[in-house]
Amino acid sequence: MSRFEGKVAFITGAARGQGRSHALAFAEAGANLVLCDRCEDSPAVRYPLATDDDLAETVRLAEAAGAKVVSEKLDTADRAAWTGSSHAPTTSSVAST
């Protein structure tokens, strides 16, 4: 049994960069994944941010590594979007893992 088999990792900013690398590391270690990213640019950031295609590629790579994956375009800075997400962790769901 691998270290994270039967566990779920919730990763924000998963479309590329550190988020993608963490998602793939958890997938390779046996975890299933809930991934999100805002997938749009921000006026506060001077370079292009991740896209829907980037998030889809992370999902593809994680599934190829054997993970079950749920993904959602979600800006975690938007509290209404965060609390309205059907995949957002709750106190009870985190405590049960």
Image (tube, rainbow, N blue to C red):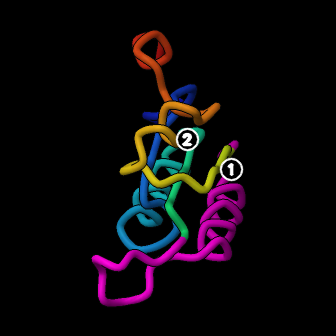
| Residue that appears at 48% across and 27% down | 89
Instruction: Find out whether the residues at labels 1 and 2 contact each other: C-beta distance under 8 Å.
Output: yes
Magenta region = 40-68
Q: What's the residue type where badge 1 is placed? A: Gly
Q: Is residue 46 above or below residue 81?
A: below
Q: Position of residue 72 (x, y in %)?
A: 63, 50
- Measuring from the top left, give residue 5's x and y in whole percent: 54, 31
- Residue 63 within the magenta-colored segment of the rendering: yes
Above or below, 81 against 18 in this view is above
> Dot 1 surroundings within 10 Å: few (below 14), some, or many (20 or more)?
some
Q: Nearer the viewer, residue 6 or 80?
A: 80
Q: Residue at x 52, y 32 (%)?
A: 88
Secondary structure under badge 2? loop
Relative horizontal placement of residue 81, taking residue 48 as reference (left or right): right
Give the answer, above or below, for where 69 lies relative to 43.
above
Q: Which residue position is annotated with label 2? A: 30
